[in-house]
Amino acid sequence: MTVASKSVAGSAVAQAISQIPDPEVPVVSIADLGILRDVAVDEAQRSIVVTITPTYSGCPAMEAIRDRIEHEAGVHGFAAEVRTQLSPAWTTDWMTESGKEALRRFGIAPPGPAHAAGPVTVRLSRHVVTCPHCGSEDTTEISHFGSTACKALRRCNACREPFDEFKAL
Amino acid sequence: MTAGSAPSPEAGSAAYVLAVADDAMVYAQRLGEWLTNAPQIEEDMALANVSLDLLGQARALYARVGELDGSGRGEDDYAMFRDERQWRNVHLVEQERGDFAREMARMLWFASYQHELYAAQLASSDPVVAGVAGKAAKEVRYHLDHARHWVLRLGDGTDESHRRMQAALEWAAPYVDELFDDHAAAVTAVEAGLVARLPSELREAAQGRVEAVVSEATLTMPDPPTWRSRGGRDGIHSRPMGYLLAELQHISRSHPGATW
């Protein structure tokens, strides 16, 4: 992400926007998730152009994120234009290390590296996911599709707790 | 378009993108019906998630169609305010929800088709088509994997699940050819560089995926069907389509302009 800013007020609004939490996973920011692609602040015009990229095509959180960006900009006295950028397509590889750690502490297994060939060629049996509760690697997938499009549902065979896994995409 | 004039390249491109979007939209609607009806709650969520991916693909493509055809129409205009004869989806996706095995047979075929389709659109001359394809290609890999796992479980499961999965493949067979028909809009789209390959050129790879799963699941590919569906790309649909549209569209049409 690039943050272009010309003044202190400008960087404050850019900072505030980068810290907006994800509506579904509030422990990580949209910057941590790699959803926020660009913030361009025009101090003279009191306007800001924010570029975001959707995680999944139908992700309903995008509407909430858009609203929140406009709200945060308004609080700082800026008019926001939110642009959606499809290409290059979002990948979980853009997630920051601190974001992945925050997910783990929240009880969601962070995504492994996204493979160019995708999950079809990756056998699930070789796909090691560590339990975010007890750290065991002995976990099994219950469902490819969890509570949201970006997550799968798993169970830990050691501590018996179910947990979400953020799917590599 | 006035009578007798050739459609402009943009209009031809719009017709193609509309067909791709309509397939996704109608199948999203059918999959959404599984909420509270799937064999287990995880599957309610899974099918709704697949539905949501397809809905998202359709929304982005409809917005693009409104630019390409010069009408300035938005996604709701296409999804909610077109009548049956204006839809360009294939018959496979409009068929009524059957048992779970039928849904997995349908998803296996449709995801295999979309997998090849979106791959052929990655280098599209249209930046939106290419952008949607880039995202969708990743999503479809999950759909395909999901269908594959269920076909394996059901095919290589109990006698009853095997019998019903085999029957489901037989059910889907007459609707498969239509996915790979080189309809006029697709031919125009290939000439315009919108997509790299004709539908017929996607078949070998898509069918190869299906055959590999069917074989691994101890099932057999059906004999060539004695009839086949046709007409969807020209707006000629089968009986379930009208009922599907009634359910999809009735709120928007009962309360035009309503927002919430």
Image (cartoon, coloured by chain):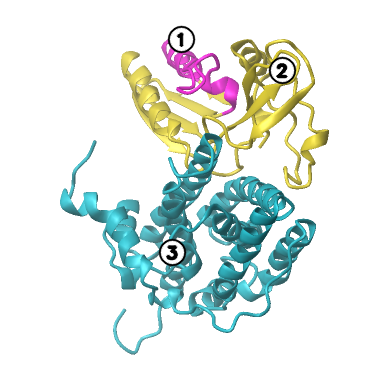
Chain colours: A yellow, B cyan
Give me the C-alpha separation between circle 1 and circle 2.
42 Å
Above or below — where is B22 with respect to A66?
A: below
Residue A32 in magenta stretch:
yes
Residue found 78% across the figure and 47% down from its top:
A121
The answer to whether dots 3 and 1 both sit on one chain is no
Marks 2/3: CA–CA distance: 41 Å
Where, quadrant-wise, is the C terminus of chain A in this rendering?
top right
Residue visible at 47% across and 50% down? Answer: B31
Question: Which of the 4 image quadrants contains residue A77?
Answer: top left
Specify which label sits upstream in the sequence, 1 or 2. 1
Amino acid type of the residue that numbered disc 3 sits on in the rendered structure: Glu
Q: Which range is magenta? A: A5-34
Label 3: which residue? B94
Label ID, residue A8: 1
> Which mark lies nearer to you, 3 or 1?
3
CA separation, marks 3 and 1? Answer: 56 Å
Above/below status of B165 relative to A155: below
Q: Secondary structure at mark 1?
A: helix
Does residue A121 appear to the left or right of B199 in the view shown?
A: right
Residue B6 against residue B221 in the figure, above or below:
below
Q: Chain of mark 3?
A: B
Q: Chain of mark 1?
A: A
| Quadrant in the rendering for residue B167 | bottom right
Instruction: Give the percent coordinates (x, y) of residue A48.
Output: 40, 26
Asked if residue B90 shows in the view, the reply is: no
Crowding at dot 2, Cα within 10 Å, few <14 / some 14-19 / many 20+, comes out as many
- Which of the pair B207/A80 is nearer the observer? B207
Q: Where's residue B8, x and y in %? A: 41, 76
Element under label 2? Answer: loop
- Quadrant placement of the N terminus of chain A: top right
Residue at the disc numbered 2: A131
